[in-house]
């Protein structure tokens, strides 16, 4: 019995260079005061003052062993809104979560402890970003025949080729991160620190290339995007147990970053 001829179609993009727009991680921390009720809510708005800049990365090796020269176009001047809901139990355990916009949405979960003068916790978040990518490279396409009874009696040529080009595209992407926070507070003043690690590009992209193959011009790239780590040190004042103003210093580092930028952040909160 004769079988049907089956083919495998692949479209891969090997980058020689590229710049990816990345937004700094969101600030996810505690409340920097003692919680005295079971249900607690916080609405906050913040603005970060920093210079948007292109940060070259150390040479990135792709899966095909070629080297890509990649830059992060890091957005440090940001405005954001955040809602947080926390529940505190009698043993000082604090759990909750929330979401925010910066300017695109993210969600997070929190777990930790909140005592009379100290709090500590862990968090995890998932967000959506949107930005521009400029890239250059080689698009490789291939049509490869699979073994079947029909192929034993017929001669079919495989199809393959390469195209070198430069392009620009706008794209949505996911990012995922985790971190911890701690603060010490007394007389309505608090000193706080939080650390967040984030993978800016959560999955392998498909980017358009000039050559359409098997009905599509989307080509897969496979790049190990390096993590970012953000330090956040702040001082805050709580007024009438409901209103809070905070000033922070942000520092973003990474093992593959050739520059480590700084920014200032101001946050206003209403706790109820």
Image (cartoon, helix red, strand yellow):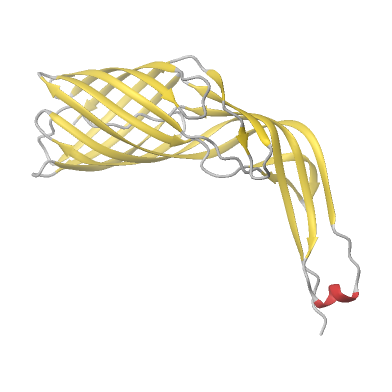
Residue lying at the far bottom of the rendered structure: 1
The quarter of the displayed image where residue 109 is located = top left
**Image quadrant for the N terminus?**
bottom right
Question: x and y percent of residue 2 in the render?
Answer: 83, 81
Residue 213, compared with residue 190, is above or below; it is below
* Residue name at image x 54 percent, y 33 percent: 130
Q: Is residue 183 left or right of residue 249?
A: left
* Residue name at image x 60 percent, y 40 percent: 223
Q: Nearer the viewer, residue 237 or 155?
A: 155
Question: x and y percent of residue 117 in the render?
Answer: 11, 28
* Residue name at image x 28 percent, y 31 percent: 29
The quarter of the displayed image where residue 224 is located = top right
Residue 44, compared with residue 1, is above or below; it is above
Residue 83, compared with residue 219, is above or below; it is above
Q: Is residue 27 left or right of residue 259?
A: left
The quarter of the displayed image where residue 165 is located = top right
Residue 121, compared with residue 257, is above or below; it is below
């Amino acid at each position: 019995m004769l079988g049907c001829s089956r083919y495998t179609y692949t479209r891969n993009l090997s980058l020689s260079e590229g710049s990816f727009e990345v937004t700094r991680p969101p600030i996810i921390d505690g409340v920097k005061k003692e919680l005295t009720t079971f249900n607690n809510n916080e609405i906050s708005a913040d603005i970060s003052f920093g210079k948007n800049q292109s940060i070259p990365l150390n040479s990135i090796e792709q899966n095909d062993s070629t080297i890509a020269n990649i830059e992060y176009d890091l957005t440090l001047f940001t405005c954001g809104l955040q809602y947080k809901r926390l529940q505190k139990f009698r043993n000082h355990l604090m759990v909750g979560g929330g979401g925010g916009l910066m300017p695109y949405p993210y969600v997070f979960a929190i777990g930790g402890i909140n005592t009379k003068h100290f709090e500590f916790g862990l968090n995890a978040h998932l967000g959506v970003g949107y930005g521009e990518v400029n890239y250059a490279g080689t698009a490789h396409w291939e049509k490869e025949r699979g073994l079947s009874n029909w192929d034993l009696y017929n001669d079919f040529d495989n199809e393959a080729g390469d195209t070198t080009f430069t392009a620009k595209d706008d794209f949505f992407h996911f990012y995922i991160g985790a971190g911890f926070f701690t603060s010490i507070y007394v007389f309505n003043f608090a000193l706080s620190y939080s650390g967040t690690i984030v993978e800016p590009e959560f999955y392998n992209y498909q980017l358009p290339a000039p050559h359409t193959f098997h009905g599509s011009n989307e080509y897969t790239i496979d790049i190990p995007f390096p993590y970012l780590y953000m330090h956040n040190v702040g001082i805050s004042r709580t007024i009438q147990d409901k209103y809070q103003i905070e000033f922070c210093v942000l520092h973003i580092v990474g093992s593959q970053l050739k520059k480590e930028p700084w920014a200032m952040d101001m946050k206003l909160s209403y706790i109820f």
